Amino acid sequence: MSDAPASTALKAVAIGASAGAVQALLHVLPALPAAFPLPVLIVVHVPPDRANALVPLFQSKCDVIVKEAEDKERVAPGVVYFAPSDYHLLVEADGTLSLSLDEPVNLSRPSIDVLLESAADAFGEGLIGVVLTGANDDGAVGLKAVTDAGGLAIVEDPAGAFVPTMPEAALRAAPTARAMDLDALRAFLLSLDAA
Amino acid sequence: MRDVIEDIEIQLLLEALFQRYHYDFRHYARASVKRRLVQARQQLGFTTISAMQEALLHDAETLPRLLNYLTVQVSEMFRDPSYFKALREKVLPHLRTYPSLKVWIAGCSNGEELYSLSILFREEGLDQRTLFYATDINPAALRAAEAGVYPLDQVRKFTENHQKSGGKTSLSDYYVADYGRAVFDKSLRAKTVFSDHSLVTDAVFAEMHLISCRNVLIYFDRALQDRAIGLFRDSLARQGFLGLGSKESLRFTKHAASFAPFVPAEKIFQRREAA
Ligand SMILES: C[S@@+](CC[C@H](N)C(=O)[O-])C[C@H]1O[C@@H](n2cnc3c(N)ncnc32)[C@H](O)[C@@H]1O
């Protein structure tokens, strides 16, 4: 039924979001079942110097486990990992996570490009890369890396996005990406569970 | 296909760097090393990583340039003020009981962390009895640490951090402004040994009461983290303290049992008595 690749081949979902991120993610994450078959890695642009409020917010609303990504931890299915504020989040080839204090990329730390490029490297065609609402173009280079590595690229349909700039930029960089509104994205992710 | 080739080239370049110059990045967290090598290749104008490797082996100027990519010099004075506050309020009262102290700042970058600790120890009246060791593998960073000069526009942030850390003095007491730069008082480093020391390849060199190693271990893979933490364990006096970066932990190391959490929220640990 679903046109998603067989979920045995899939390894992870990586999502980037900026302005409007919380509303967009609220549309999607609470719907995921506790047994969601993939790890979900998320970079949201949040100001540094601020305790990451996303984790407690989504913990209280989700069935999947929600946590802040820790350095050198191994990703597991059914767990949502948020990048800590002021650190980049990267995926290593062995499926563990690394944090870094490298300079901001696209004026952002964490940066969506850094997550998507390293995840594309680590998971190749097993990666689903997603770029949601945002007012900059972080994630565009990363989403192209996802498609170059044979992964599946998705952008939030700019027509309905809170701020269309970021999904538009990602779509320009990765023209084969599928545009979906948030309902479709949610249904798509749930179809992975059914597979 | 291209990426597979690049991965091979990166492995070979790191091997060349080790064999030729004894800088060992082979077990650094690879995703970030790769990003920075690709960036170096682009910015230094090489078409391939292999071409960059050739320059590294045959042209002496390439090594320092590449080191500036491979080591990340991002730091701040009193970065994470709550860490320094915890040192001030919880750790220093213990250190005060010793007649002389040794403090090691491992991976000191351009010296920001050293000057922070030196100011903290002076404010708490412990500076006279303390010897600091500031070590790093990047010679340019060590030179900058020894100079203690920072752009004035960064100093605003340093000042704010210092206040939040419970600073008892004004940061401006410790530097003079000079053409857009803040030149820190050299008395702050009067009792500091600056040294080229690698947590990957070098050994224990003194017995420490406090080791502060922040945001260095995140760049290592697990095996290398184990090595460095073993080195810290062997370098610490009985009941000595180890402070890590705010996103670093002892969770994944085999030496976890050698340390007791002291201020867990600030990643400050205490060496347990040997079993
Ligand atoms: C991100 S900076 C951290 C600076 C400072 N400690 C802080 O937290 O603000 C990392 C530093 O670790 C140094 N470093 C990298 N590998 C090292 C090694 N093997 N031994 C010692 N220092 C190392 C780098 O040169 C750099 O100065």
Image: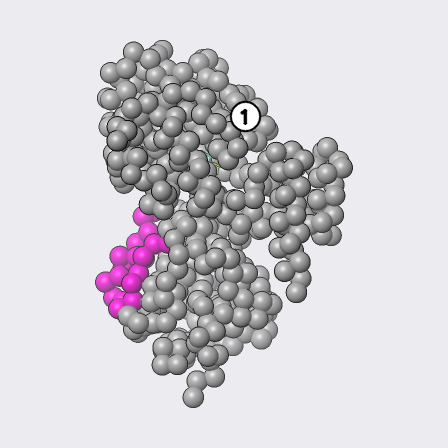
Callout 1 crowding tier (Cα within 10 Å): few <14, some 14–19, many ≥20? some
Which image quarter: residue A18? bottom left
Which residues lie in the magenta part? A49-69
Front residue of A4 and B21: B21
Task: Say if the magenta span includes residue A59.
Answer: yes
What residue is at 67 percent from the left and 35 percent from the top? B20
Front residue of B3 and A112: B3
Residue B207 visible in the snapshot: yes
Mark 1 Cβ inside 8 Å of ligand 1: no
Left or right of B118, for residue A3 = right
Please give the residue where the numbered disc 1 appears in the rendered image.
B196
Task: Say if the magenta span includes residue A51.
Answer: yes
Front residue of A62 and B204: B204
Is B98 above or below relative to A103?
A: above
Residue B25 in the image: state x and y as whole percent: 56, 41
What residue is at 44 percent from the left and 14 percent from the top? B191
Q: Quadrant of the N terminus of chain A?
A: bottom left
Residue B156 visible in the snapshot: no
Is B22 above or below relative to B218?
A: above
- For label 1, the SS is strand
Q: Amino acid at mark 1?
A: Asp
Name the chain under label 1.
Answer: B
Front residue of A162 and A121: A121
Is A8 above or below relative to B205?
A: below
Left or right of A107, for residue B229 = left
Is A176 above or below relative to B137?
A: below
Residue B245 in the image: state x and y as whole percent: 38, 38
Q: Quadrant of the C terminus of chain A?
A: bottom left
Residue A192 in the image: state x and y as whole percent: 40, 77
Residue A34 in the image: state x and y as whole percent: 28, 70
What residue is at 29 percent from the left and 38 percent from the top? B257
What residue is at 44 percent from the left and 35 percent from the top? B228
